[in-house]
Image: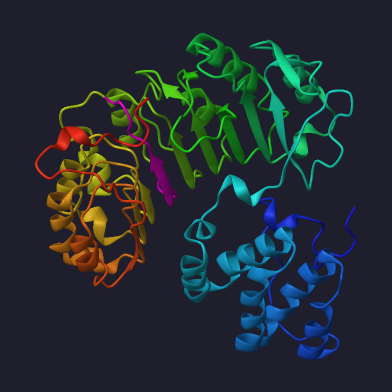
Amino acid sequence: MNNNPDKPREFDAVLGGETPPPVSGVVLGGIEGVKSRLKSPEARERASALIDALRYQEEGFQLVIQALKDPSDKVQLFAARLLRDKGGQKGKQVLLRHNPQQCFTMLEDWQFETFYPNIGITSAISTAYNVNLYREEPNPRGGFDIVEDFNLDALQVFLNDTQVSEVEALACWMPDVSYLQIYHKECQILINMLCKASQRLRNLKALFIGDRRQHEYKKSRIYLSDVISILETFPNLEVLKLHGNPSNTLFSKKIYYPSLKTLILETADNDARALAQVCTLELPSLEYLELWGGRCRYSHFDFFETLFSGELLRNLSYLGLPSFENTDVLVEALVQSPIIERLAVLDISMGTLTDNGAENLLNCPSVNWLHTLNISKNCISPQIIQQLSQLDCRLIADSQEENYRRGQAASRYWALHE
């Protein structure tokens, strides 16, 4: 039990816990005392000092900014969380310059650890858990081999743990064996199991479902099923990240869901019907939306009409549409839409954007209102990159395709084509 609510428990601010206490008044030792505590070798003490630093207006604010480079990752995340939740617009501007994703509620707000059934939940308040949905055994080479592709035994032990009601973040990891296909019926079994345990998971705020393979250009071959029951069953969910190939009924019906702040669908093989379903969800608190394209087999972008209108996503600030097949057409629709005027960050990286599509960005005045425009890993000429760099926003434009031959669009493929 934490007897002093004004002092952070370890990881509190980076785990999606309660918002730090109000910052008002002064503390013993004044600003010099805060500075002294920020030199402590203990990360927990430095994090505690940051809360007090914000009581000292600009000087304290600068101390929190400096803590974004603290030697401890946990203190860095703590500082980012304070700037996001207590720093107002000025704090968010700092984070946009430092790391745009830190402006938003993300899975990275929590510190994840692997759940071991023989150990159980050891620190529910300060730890988020990865639960492996497969079984592995040691091999003679000193590593591990997967001996069962889909196994929910560990998850069942996790759900039965006496401390599970305090867990805020959960990652359900599928195996990461190359080219393994786990079909959506297994995913549906998992979803049903989670929903059945919703009363025990009553504090769940962040959920990841998918495989754990992290590769720049090869993404999951897990097949996702209908996840609408997740939203219906978990009313406090703020972050939902799905890593896999969606079925054509990823969200089987329209829903009003006021809690969700971040939605990510990362895949190499999206489905136009799944994208259309995402675009019709009414998510008034959503700030961060990331939808990967890949091999979607679409011929137009009519399914984005509702999304681009901004009517259902009134607070959207970050829009990521990476790895689309026909990025030029996507950009043409986007720059004519109302939503472009609301965004702080637009990510259209890893696609097929050419100079023709980039011209639409250059000719759109609202692009200058963005804080960050990410067009990396496309196929834009150095001359157009130079023109884009004159826009009144931060431009990320690295790793353009060097061997692209003008007029032969077939020579370019989007980044996640497999």
Residue at 60 percent across and 40 percent down: it is 206
The magenta stretch spans residue 288: yes
Q: Is residue 142 left or right of residue 354?
A: right
Tell me, yes or no, if residue 316 can be seen here.
Answer: no
The colour mode here is rainbow
> With respect to residue 243, does 65 lie above or below?
below
State whether residue 413 is above or below residue 295. Answer: below
In terms of image quadrants, where is residue 300? top left
The one of 387 and 267 positioned closer to us in this rendering? 387
| The residue positioned farthest toward the front in the image shown | 403
In the shown orientation, is residue 113 left or right of residue 93?
right
Res. 203 in view = yes
**Number of numbered discs present?**
0
Residue nearer the viewer, 23 or 8: 8
Q: Which residues are magenta?
A: 284-296
Q: Is residue 23 above or below residue 216?
A: below
- Residue 241 position within the rendered picture, expressed as x and y whole percent measured from the top left: 52, 36
Q: At x 28% / y 46%, what residue is drawn?
A: 401
The residue located at (49%, 11%) in the rendering is 183
Q: Main secondary structure of the magenta part?
A: loop
Viewer-closest of 355 and 67: 355
Across and down, in percent, residue 318 comes to: 39, 53
- Which quadrant of the rendered structure holds the C terminus? top left
Task: Indicate left or right for 289 with 300 as reference.
Answer: right
Vertical placement of residue 284 versus 66, above or below: above
Query: Which quadrant of the structure image shows residue 408?
Result: top left
Give the side of residue 295 with respect to residue 86, left or right.
left
Task: Verify whether residue 92 appears in magenta.
Answer: no
Query: Residue 312: horizontal and vertical position, in percent?
Result: 32, 44
Q: Nearer the viewer, residue 44 or 377?
A: 377
Could you say where residue 211 lies in the image, as x and y percent from the top left? Answer: 57, 26
